[in-house]
Each structure stands twice: as structure tokens, then as C-alpha cells.
Amino acid sequence: MNFFDRLHDRIRTVDSVVSVGLDPDPSRIPDHLTEYDLPRWAFNRRIIDATHEHAAVYKPNAAFYEDPDGWAALEETIAYAHGKNVPVLLDAKRADIGNTTRQYAQILEKADAITVNPYMGRDSLQPFLADEESGVFILCRTSNPGGADIQDLELESGEPVYERVAALADLWNENDNVGLVVGATKPEELEELREQVPDLPFLVPGVGAQGGDAEAAVEFGLANGVGLVNSSRGIIFAGEHDGEEFAKASGQAAKRLKKRLNQYRD
Ligand SMILES: O=c1ccn([C@@H]2O[C@H](COP(=O)(O)O)[C@@H](O)[C@H]2O)c(=O)[nH]1
């Protein structure tokens, strides 16, 4: 079954488009978990227990796992999320020349979907695009202020780079497995892009800690009801640092976000 069909089912089952970002910054992990062999895994397990009923996906960002213990923590986390029937979207922003990108794409044997960087062009994404079962979210208009430096540049045709990326992504979507990453901090661009590519689901980061527009994220992020609105720090660090209460607070934050976003869903 294709990733977006699986995601559609998951969204229906939990009545939620919330992507829970698993970015376990070691400096913010509660003290009582730092004694574990894999503190990031101990942390994520508790977050998953508390949030899975509200999670359409989990989105670990690879940056928080790129060391030997980190990869072990990530593998445990992915397996545990799957045990709760929640798909995993790895925010890795990968892509490279052919033989290198083929190695990167092997991660899709574990995760269900990945974010990729279009800067190196189609061949750098080919192994991801060719994987019919997995989702591929292409960075299009990112949520950070510096996203404008390149993505907003006007081409000779008058279109900005991010619109060209969306047009290419639509072209590359031969296996119905492509989505776009568009920040909630860019509501006007979200609206324009939804008009331009009506059938591509968006992953919309930037609500919560980055203060993005939750209503626009839902109104324009979903294609035929399918899409994701991510919050990471706003959910996983919703509580105090110490004690088991942190997980309860993350469950409440995920539930709150789900309710808030559901106000805007059809
Ligand atoms: O444009 C982008 C692309 C990716 N991200 C990632 O999403 C989360 C956001 O975390 P918050 O704590 O909810 O701000 C994080 O992993 C980013 O690297 C993004 O923010 N913007």
C-alpha cells in the first residue's frame, strides 16, 4: 500500500493530521532519563506512549540521532512507533549524487517516508522517487527566515524558485508518492502553492515554537484531506524537565493541537 493511502487511513483512524516531531535535544531530556543507556530512546518511548492516539505520524529529525547511540535510539523509536501503528517520517533532508543517494535511500527500509532536498536535481532524488511504497517530501518553501535567500529568487520566467520546485515535484510524482515541505510561517506561499499543485500533500512545519499560522497550515496543507502539520518542541517539551509528568504534558499538548487543527478541517 502506497504511503499516502496508509497516511489517509491513519488520519481517519485517529482523526488527526498532527505530526509529532521527535527531536530529543539531549540538553532538554529530563534528568531522571539521563541514567538510561539510550536516554533519547527512553524519552521517545514515553512521548510515544503519551501521544500516539493523537499522532498521524512521528517525525524524528535525523539531526538529533547522528551518532552511534543516536542511530540505536532511532531504530528503537521507529520500531516502537510501528508497534503503535503510527507511520514514521524521517526528516533527513537527504539527496546526493547517484551512488551516495542510493545509500541514503536505504533508510526507507525502516522509515515510511523521508524529507529530501531538491537542490541537486532529479537524479539525486531518483532512488527515493522510485520507491513506490514510501513517501518523499521535497523541501519547497521552508519555514526559516533564510528560506527566502534562495527559494524566493525570481527566475527569468518571473516565477520564484519555490514555485519551480513545486512544478518539478509534480512532474516527478509518477508513483503518487511525492509531497512538499512548506512552512506554516509562510501562509501566502502555502495558499499559492496549494492552487498550483492541488494534489500534492504538504508537510507543514512551523506551528508551535516557530509561531506559524495553524489555520493556513490546515486549509492549504491538505490535499483531498491528506497532509501533515508538525509540531516538535511545542509537544515534546510542553512539560517541566523533571519527573514523569513531562510525558503527560506532551500528550495533552498533542491532543490540544489536534483539536485546534481539527477546527479547520472539512
Ligand atoms: O521548513 C522546515 C523544514 C523542517 N523543519 C523541521 O521541523 C521541525 C520543527 O520543530 P519545532 O520545534 O516545531 O519548531 C524541526 O525538526 C525542523 O528541523 C522546519 O522547522 N522547517
Image (cartoon, grey):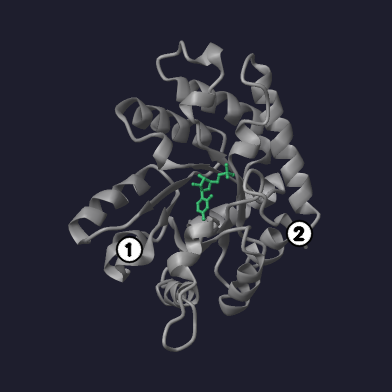
Q: Residues within 10 Å of mark 2 (few under 14, many from 20)?
A: some
Q: Residues within 10 Å of mark 1 (few under 14, many from 20)?
A: many
Which of the two residues, 2 or 44, is positioned nearer the viewer here?
A: 44
| Relative vertical location of residue 212 with respect to residue 200 in this rendering, above or below | above
Q: Which mark is residue 125?
A: 1
Which image quarter is the C terminus in? bottom right
Numbered disc total: 2
| Relative vertical location of residue 239 with respect to residue 92 in this rendering, above or below | above
- Location of residue 97 in the rendering, given as x and y in whole percent from the top left corner: 22, 61
Q: On the rendered structure, is 54 left or right of 1?
A: right
Which of the two residues, 258 or 175, is positioned nearer the viewer here?
A: 258
**Residue that protrudes farthest toward the bottom in the picture:** 157
* Residue 176 shows in this picture: no
- Location of residue 168 in the rendering, given as x and y in whole percent from the top left corner: 42, 76
Name the amino acid type tagged 2: Arg
Tell which circle, 2 or 1, labels the residue nearer the N-terminal end: 1
| Relative vertical location of residue 57 with respect to residue 199 in this rendering, above or below | above
Name the amino acid type tagged 1: Leu
Residue at 74% x, 32% y: name it: 252
Residue at 57% x, 79% y: name it: 196
- Location of residue 116 in the rendering, given as x and y in whole percent from the top left corner: 39, 57
- Location of residue 63 in the rendering, given as x and y in whole percent from the top left corner: 40, 40
* Residue 100 shows in this picture: yes
Q: On the rendered structure, is 230 left or right of 39?
A: right
Measure how far apart labels 2 and 1 are at the Cα level.
32 Å
- Which image quarter: residue 183? bottom right
Q: Which mark is residue 265?
A: 2
Element type at mark 2 = loop
Q: Are marks 2 and 1 in contact (CB under 8 Å)?
A: no
